[in-house]
Image: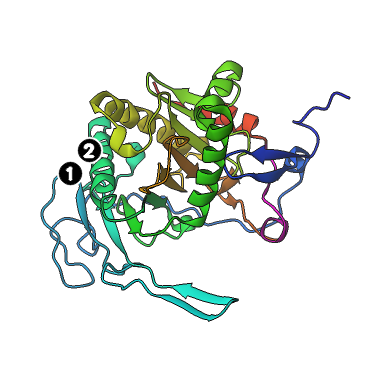
């Protein structure tokens, strides 16, 4: 029986995590009577004397930021992880186990300008951010098993400061989401002797319907198994284990494709588009990581407009993830907003 997946509810498999997602395209037709988020798009000043991330300003711990001209990295004043934490395993009962966790948390200011986002920065300045991502991964990867580079953008994503910035967390353990990807990519490589994500990239190149944008070294796709309405996956077209593998041409083309993707997001609903994004590369472990391929996830929460957010509640929290518009429809809408 021939089934139109754009019309009928169905489940899609995510080979990167081994999990399923429910897709219900027919629900996109229902009227919306839920919460409407307040849109706040007032233009910010280039410098805010009250912002603890702007150049020359005092931070919460009393330190003063330097008069930085491009990027600036410092230890998070409210770190979730502390480097001097001793490693201790605690087992009060087989069902009550804990382990202390050393680590480091840093803040990365993308620009001294308070009024910009990555999407609004020049490609050359985005490339400087890429350079810092590489430097931080290289430095912290020598001491920790996992280095998580990420950005939460927008109040709706819980970002407490609008100044353009991201974070770097490093810890001596493999986090849950990363472990899923590690097991799946390793298993695939052991069975096929090829990279799961590079094989997936080849499939998407052949079909083309979910590709948002690409250039010489990079490709952005709304993955077949996407959970968030306008979720995207950013992949290098050649084998790369980690950000530390990026050479000069890879960094420039990454900056260029980030500029195009993030501009397309902003044009989708004519706002500074909120999202959480982060890089996943091979962890720094002794066992084999041959199945790994570097990639970045972009998880934007908006569903129908600048005022309608996708919530993970009810069935999503108690059963499995669910989406309404199909990834193919999302890719088409994002392509419409691409610049140059």
> In the displayed structure, does residue 321 sit left or right of residue 291?
right
Q: What is the number of the mark on residue 128?
A: 2
Q: Where on the picture, by quarter, is residue 29?
A: top right
Q: Name the image quarter holding the C terminus.
A: top left
Q: Which residue is mark 1?
A: 70
Q: Looking at the picture, does residue 296 appear above or below residue 77?
A: above
Answer whether residue 158 is visible to the viewer in this image: yes
Element assignment for label 1: loop
Residue depth check, mark 2 versus mark 1: number of the one nearer the observer: 2
Taking the spot 54% from the left edge, 45% from the top edge, the residue there is 183
Q: Residues within 10 Å of mark 2 (few under 14, many from 20)?
A: some
Q: Looking at the picture, does residue 45 appear above or below residue 202?
A: below
The spot of residue 265 in percent (x, y) is 47, 37
Q: Is residue 37 part of the magenta span, yes or no?
A: no
Query: Alpha carbon of mark 2 to alpha carbon of mark 1: how far?
Result: 8 Å
The spot of residue 2 in percent (x, y) is 85, 23
> In the displayed structure, does residue 29 sit left or right of residue 286?
right
> In the displayed structure, does residue 194 sit left or right of residue 314?
left
Q: Are marks 2 and 1 in contact (CB under 8 Å)?
A: yes
Mark 2 or mark 1, earlier in chain: 1
Q: Name the image quarter holding the N terminus.
A: top right
Q: Residues within 10 Å of mark 1 (few under 14, many from 20)?
A: some
The residue closer to the viewer here, 106 or 50, is 106
Taking the spot 48% from the left edge, 49% from the top edge, the residue there is 178
The spot of residue 334 in percent (x, y) is 53, 31
Q: Which residues are magenta?
A: 315-325
Answer whether residue 121 is visible to the viewer in this image: no
The spot of residue 329 in percent (x, y) is 64, 30
Residue farthest to the left, as pictured: 67
């Amino acid at each position: 029986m021939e089934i139109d997946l754009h019309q009928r509810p169905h489940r899609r498999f995510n080979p990167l995590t081994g999990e399923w997602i429910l897709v219900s395209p027919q629900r996109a037709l229902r009227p919306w009577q839920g919460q409407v988020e307040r849109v706040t798009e007032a233009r910010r000043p280039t410098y805010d004397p009250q912002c603890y991330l702007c150049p020359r300003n005092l931070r919460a711990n009393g330190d003063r930021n330097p008069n930085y001209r491009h990027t600036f990295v410092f230890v998070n004043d409210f770190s979730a992880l502390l480097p001097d934490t001793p490693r201790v395993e605690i087992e009060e009962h087989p069902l009550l186990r804990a382990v202390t966790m050393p680590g480091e948390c840093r803040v990365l200011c993308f620009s001294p300008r308070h009024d910009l986002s990555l999407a609004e920065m020049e490609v050359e300045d985005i490339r400087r951010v890429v350079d810092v991502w590489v430097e931080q991964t290289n430095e912290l990867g020598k001491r920790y098993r996992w280095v998580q580079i990420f950005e939460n953008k927008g109040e709706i994503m819980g970002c407490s400061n609008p100044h353009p910035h991201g974070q770097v967390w490093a810890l001596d353990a493999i986090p849950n989401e990363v472990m899923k990807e590690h097991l799946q990519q390793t298993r695939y490589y052991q069975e096929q002797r090829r990279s799961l994500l590079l094989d997936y990239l080849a499939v998407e190149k052949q079909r083309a319907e979910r590709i948002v944008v690409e250039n010489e070294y990079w490709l952005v796709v709304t993955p077949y198994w996407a959970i968030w309405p306008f979720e995207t996956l950013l992949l290098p077209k050649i084998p790369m284990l980690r950000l530390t593998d990026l050479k000069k041409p890879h960094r420039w083309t990454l900056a260029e494709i980030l500029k195009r993707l993030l501009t397309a997001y902003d044009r989708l609903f004519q706002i500074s588009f909120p999202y959480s994004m982060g890089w996943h590369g091979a962890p720094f472990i002794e066992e084999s990581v041959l199945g790994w391929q570097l990639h970045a996830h972009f998880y934007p929460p908006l569903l129908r407009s600048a005022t309608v957010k996708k919530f993970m509640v009810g069935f999503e929290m108690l059963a499995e993830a669910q989406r309404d518009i199909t990834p193919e429809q999302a890719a088409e809408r994002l392509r419409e907003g691409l610049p140059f």
